[in-house]
Image (cartoon, rainbow, N blue to C red):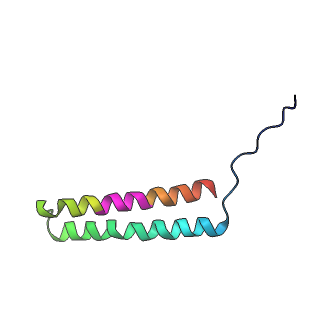
Amino acid sequence: MSDTPSPGPQPRSGCATAFMVMFGVLLLLPGFCALIFAIDSHFDSRFMPVLILGLLTAFAGVMLIRAARKRS
């Protein structure tokens, strides 16, 4: 039997990585807006769902950028 190692995952094209990073940066914007809005409203509890949704969207953007950098 041959002991040839199986090839690892193929690297992504530069275009796919660039699109992932651009979309990740785009997802960061709602998080920044939510933080600015929350600070401006002095953390009013009525705006907490909007703040959480914006921060979760920004977290998804950070994870997308991280995944693009990891596999490029």
Instruction: Determine which quarter of the picture holds residue 70.
Output: bottom right
Q: Is residue 5 magenta?
A: no
Residue drawn 83% across the image and 36% down it: 4
Estimate the x, y position of residue 27 in percent, counting from the top left: 41, 67
Q: Image check: 69 left or right of 63?
A: right
Quadrant housing the C terminus: bottom right
Task: Please state if 48 lies on the left or on the right of 60 as rendered.
Answer: left
Q: Residue at x 46, y 55 (%)?
A: 63
Q: Main secondary structure of the magenta part?
A: helix
Span shown in magenta: 54-61
Residue positioned most to the right: 1
- Across and down, in percent, residue 66 comes to 51, 56
What residue is shown at x 14% (from left), y 66% (from top)? 42
Q: Which residue is nearer to you in this view: 38 or 7?
A: 7
In this rendering, is residue 9 above or below 38?
above
x 31%, y 60%: residue: 55
Image position of 11 (left or right of 27)? right
Q: Quadrant of residue 14?
A: bottom right
Residue 31 in sight in this render: yes
